[in-house]
Amino acid sequence: MGDQKEVSFLPFHAINEFMLDEYRFRVIRATLEKLHELPVNHQHSINRLTKKLVQVHGFRNSVKAPTGLKIKPSVQAFEKSPAFVAAILEAWAGINSHLGEQIYTLLINRGWDILPLDTDRAKLPGFLTDWPEGENYEVLYQAFYDMYPESQTDKDDISLMIVWLAGRLPWSK
């Protein structure tokens, strides 16, 4: 019984501590702009949470507001709601599935213990708080660009996909 390991999770909205405001805005804008391209379950999840959490001046139902008007209040919901963060990031990962496949391959090749790529991570309780020993963003960026030298992927997108697929924030205790 003494061998049991305690696992702790941070709520999904803890990711805001790691995101620059401008990048958070870009992720939400890109996700909302491409929402119609996503599977219906992702659309319903985001629309349900938008209706509940996002207030757009002049609209009783914020889902019906133009995307441009929804972005700023969606950022506010993203900063406060773990469920909204999970829905947005699951959709963002779906929009960026090619990057997801690359990051998944990278992490598996480096020995990370992560869930299968097609897992709905939005159903998890939050982020784990540890990374494998010796791993950090700089090491992973270098490994990514070594593996995919033709890639022009932004480091912020690489970081977010690592965090999302691994289900881990690099939280220092």
Image: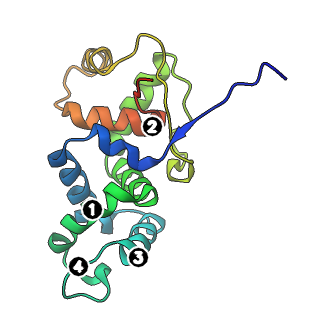
Report how far apart the C-alphas of labels 2 and 1 lie in the structure. 24 Å
57, above or below 117, in the image? below
Of 59 and 119, which appears nearest the observer? 59
Q: Tell me what residue is drawn at x 36 percent, y 58 percent.
A: 80
Q: Tell me what residue is drawn at x 41 percent, y 70 percent.
A: 49
Name the N-terminal-most of marks 2 and 1.
Answer: 1
Observer-side mark, 2 or 1, equals 1
Report how far apart the C-alphas of labels 2 and 3 lie in the structure. 27 Å
At label 4, which amino acid type do we have? Val
Location of residue 37 in the rendering, given as x and y in whole percent from the top left corner: 32, 64
* Residue that label 1 marks: 76
Helix, strand or loop status at disc 1: helix
Q: Quadrant of the C terminus?
A: top left
* Residue that label 2 marks: 165
* 81 horizontally vs 115: left or right: left
43, above or below 150, in the image? below
At label 3, which amino acid type do we have? Lys
Location of residue 78 in the rendering, given as x and y in whole percent from the top left corner: 33, 58
Report how far apart the C-alphas of labels 2 and 4 lie in the structure. 31 Å
* Residue that label 4 marks: 56
Report how far apart the C-alphas of labels 4 and 1 lie in the structure. 11 Å
* 45 horizontally vs 116: left or right: left
| Residue contact between numbered discs 2 and 3, judged by CB atoms under 8 Å | no
View extreme (right): residue: 1
Name the N-terminal-most of marks 1 and 3.
Answer: 3
At label 2, which amino acid type do we have? Leu
Location of residue 157 in the rendering, given as x and y in whole percent from the top left corner: 25, 38
**Label 2 crowding class (10 Å Cα cut-off): few <14, some 14-19, many 20+?**
many
Name the N-terminal-most of marks 4 and 1.
Answer: 4
* Residue that label 3 marks: 52
